Image (cartoon, rainbow, N blue to C red):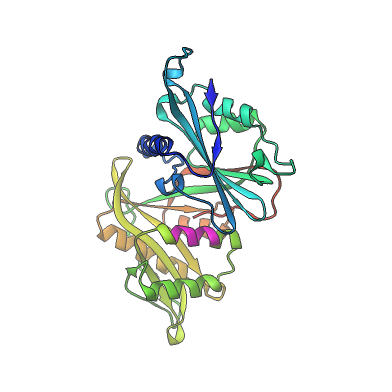
Amino acid sequence: MISCQWCEELADDDRDEVLALVGAAAEYDDEAGFSRIEPRDVTARSRPGVWVSHLAVKARRGLSALDDVPLVVVAYLTIAVDDDGLGSVQFVVHPDYRSRGIATLLVEELGLDVDRPDGWMGTGARTLRVWAFGTHPAAERLTRRFGISSVSRLWTLFRSLTGPFAVPLDPVHLPAGSVLEAPRGLEAPESVKALDDVLGRSGIPAAQLEKLSESRAHGTGSVVLASGDAGRPQGFVWLDPSLHTHLELRAAWIRALVLEKEARGGGLGAALLVRALEVLRDAGAQIALMRIDPDDDGAVRLCRLLSFEQEDAHTCYQVGEWHEAPGYL
């Protein structure tokens, strides 16, 4: 019923079909907030330290049983495997072919054996990880059926900025000696240097730093920096004021909030977050969105104090064993 073959680079026709597929899926899933694959991932190639492979999953159009019906791409999977054998998987089914058993057939076809000498499917992956964003019933059914365990969670939170449900943004007193700078571009040289400085003293796990670095490389928006004595950066909030429609409201994202270890617990994080909310409100956003680790008690407490509410939950699934927690933005 399905056919597929691994490749390091998709052929031209397959690449065009896959790009159309991920575009259609992103548009279809946008409101629900499900996982999406970026076009740059479809054209990604292996690089030092990371081996990339692609899988265009094909079936007869309409899942016809007739041999003269042409094959079309109905799903797409890509995996990036690092030198240590950790494989990061992304997978999507075309909206027209969902709830028809494509994902189940693919797992049955490929299997989940990561203990072979050459890793899963010869990719070198000793462990597989995939993030499922949104409470997707198909992901829950599939992982339950094949005994795939969850290893991490994320929450998407929202905060009303205008309208009848908006709570006033009360000023937050800064710790003595700290100041908040005006927003500046994410890619500005001063921003890059200051963010790297803060991240180097943040104590964030390596996997998280890597994910944040990757997201910054492709991200947009601005940052608000907090500085202490002699202008040393103590923390930052990365926000993206570009507006999109979410639940029929104008929404914008807060992408990251990071403090150096020594600056935590004194109210600086709250001050940065409030400033970010003010900037998004002034840019026309009706709601602000952000993601947090629900196991981070400090982040949960801060967001509750600032009237954020949980909207959705996301899950990282894993096959095999690994010593580090998953990275996320």
Observer able to see residue 173? no
Percent position (x, y) of residue 269? 46, 67
Percent position (x, y) of residue 153? 57, 47
Residue at the extreme top: 66
Residue 191 quadrant: bottom left
Looking at the picture, does residue 276 appear above or below residue 293?
Answer: below
Please say whether residue 215 is one of the residues in the magenta stretch.
yes
On screen, residue 242 versus residue 259, left or right, reads left
Residue at 49 percent across and 66 percent down: it is 258
On screen, residue 319 versus residue 60, left or right, reads right
Number of labels in the image equals 0
Residue 258 or residue 89, whichever sits in front: 89
Residue at 35 percent across and 59 percent down: it is 220
Residue 31 or residue 62, whichever sits in front: 62
On screen, residue 280 versus residue 144, left or right, reads left
Q: Which residues are magenta?
A: 210-216
Looking at the picture, does residue 212 appear above or below residue 18?
Answer: below
Residue at 31 percent across and 54 percent down: it is 161
Residue 256 or residue 217, whichever sits in front: 217
Observer able to see residue 272? yes
Percent position (x, y) of residue 50? 58, 54
